[in-house]
Every structure is written in structure tokens, then in C-alpha cells.
Amino acid sequence: MFLRYISSPLQADLALQKLFAPLPVHIGLDIEWKPNHVKNTPENPVALLQIATSDDVYLFHLSRLRFFPPKLRLLLINPFITKSGVGIQYDVTKLWTDCGISVSSCVDLSLLARSIDSTLFAYRLGDYSHIPLYPQSSPTVDNPYDPYEHRLFRGPFKNPIGLARFARMFQGTELDKGRTARSNWESPLSSQQIKYAAADATTSYSTYFSLLNLLNPIPSDLCPKRKYFMFDAIRGAKYLPIQPEQRLPYPTISTFTDSDAESYLHGLAPIQQPHGLFPWSLTNPEYDPAPRPIVDSKKACT
């Protein structure tokens, strides 16, 4: 995978030419900013925006560029390009607050993982096919067997799953989450910072496809709806994505121009998008959080 560090207008032009030829259908997305060590003071603005594709990683050093490239803005609002990340709900809100950038078709990897895992378990598909299907009852101390112990992801739907956990699970790698994360992202980047930033973006990209592979055993009519794990972030507010009821993780591809982008921001739809902007809610009524594990007090004391 080729790494492109962009800190000048010329580098931005060249990088975006490569990024748009051909246009990706999916990107991994992440941002970094300089930490503020003074209590009760506002956060510093976004300093770095990372994008990963199948072949390249782009590190747009916004604090050095001092402007937001227009073609990058168009890429982020294009609803036919999915953007995945952990903590993406906060990241895209910060992009609007700091840069005035709207982002569409945002995939929250935690929500996607929980939605897929719950469906696989409910119908005993994939790695859960060996677990018997029988009427479920909550385990007790006297009857401690818990079929849910096999679940990869259990607990409240809203609970985040860390990117480091995804990296260990799907790529067998460890992400550095030490001091580098809290370093100064506004200064020229060190080799360690570049490595850290690239790893986060590539993990966000590859985790998306690892999760899609888990969808293979699920019949198309049982796949989670897009609105359960995807949203549009327009002018700081979250709305339903394009084709929200579709039970496939990606939209039907269509062309998207500069004029389409302006219309989309006002709820005027491109092809296949209902007219208007409809608020998104963080919920999945089909999700089963699983009961809390029962701890055997006798065993716990031994």
C-alpha cells in the first residue's frame, strides 16, 4: 500500500487526481488533532485527515495546507462512496464544526459489527451454526450454560468497539494507542505519527471488508438495513443515508457531480434518494444485546 503525505497545494492536486482515477466505492476515514492540555478550553481544530483505499493511504495535513481541497469536499459528500471508521459519529461532527464539511454514507463499524453478529447468532449462521437452536432462557447460577457466550459482540447496541480490537480480530495486528495518539498533530509529522495515522485509516478500511465477509451466510432479506449502521452528516446534523431500507451495506452506484453535491446538501435527491432530509436515530430494533453474563458466586470465591 502506497503512502501519500500531503502538506502543500501541489501535493493535494496530485493526490486527488490519483484518488479520483478511478473513484473508490469505499474509503477508510479518520482524523487527528492537537490535544489541549488545559482544562475547560475548546478542542483544537482538525489537523490531519486520513483516507485509505485498496491501494493507497492519503494523509491530508490540513493544518499545513491551510485550506480544504474542493475535490476532497466533493469526495466526502458523495453518497455513493461509503466511509467507514470507529468513532466516525464524532469525527464527522468535528469536521463540520472545524471545517464546514458534510460527509455522507458514514459507516459506524461498531454498529455494523453488532448488527451482523446479532443476525448471525439469531439464525445460527456462519461460525454459530454449531450452537443448538432452542427456546432461549436467561442463564442462572444453577443453570449457568449461556449460549450467548459464543457471541463476538454482546451488550448495548450503542457501546463502541475499539479499532484495536478489530485489528487484533481481523488482521492479527496490534495498533499503537500510546503517546502518539496524544502528540502534536499540527507540527510536521514524525515517522511514528505517519505510521500511526496510516495504520488507523487502513484498519478502518480493511475492517469494513472483513465485516462484509461475515455477511456471506446471511440471506439478503435478513441482512441489516443500512439505516442501522449508516448515516449522513449534513451541516452537523445526522440524517438517514441514501437507500436507508436497503438490506445491503453499499448503495447502487450512480454518477455524482458538483451540482448533485449542492442539491444533496439541501435534501434534493440524486437518483434513488427520497426527497428531503430525514433525521437518523442510533437504533436497531432487530438487534439482540444478549443477557448479562451470570457470575457463579461460589466459583468466584474459589
Image (tube, rainbow, N blue to C red):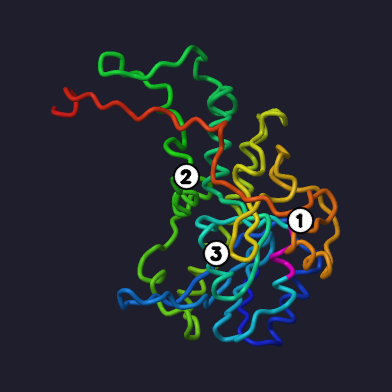
Residues 241 and 134: in front is: 241
Residues 74 and 203: in front is: 74
Q: Taking 254 as reference, is 173 left or right? A: left
Q: Tell me, yes or no, whether the highlighted magenta stretch contains residue 76.
A: yes
Q: Position of residue 126 (x, y in %)?
A: 59, 28
Total marks shown come to: 3
Looking at marks 3 and 1 on the same chain, the residue that comes earlier in the sequence is marked by 1
Q: Name the residue: 47% across, 74% down.
A: 33
Residue identified by numbered label 2: 158
* Classed neighbour count for the residue bearing mark 1: other residues with Cα under 10 Å, few (<14), some (14–19), many (≥20): many
Q: Which residues are magenta?
A: 74-80
Residues 224 and 101: in front is: 101
| Tag nearer the camera, 3 or 1 | 3
Q: Quadrant of the C terminus?
A: top left
Amino acid type of disc 1?
Phe
Amino acid type of disc 2?
Lys
Q: Name the residue: 39% across, 75% down.
A: 35
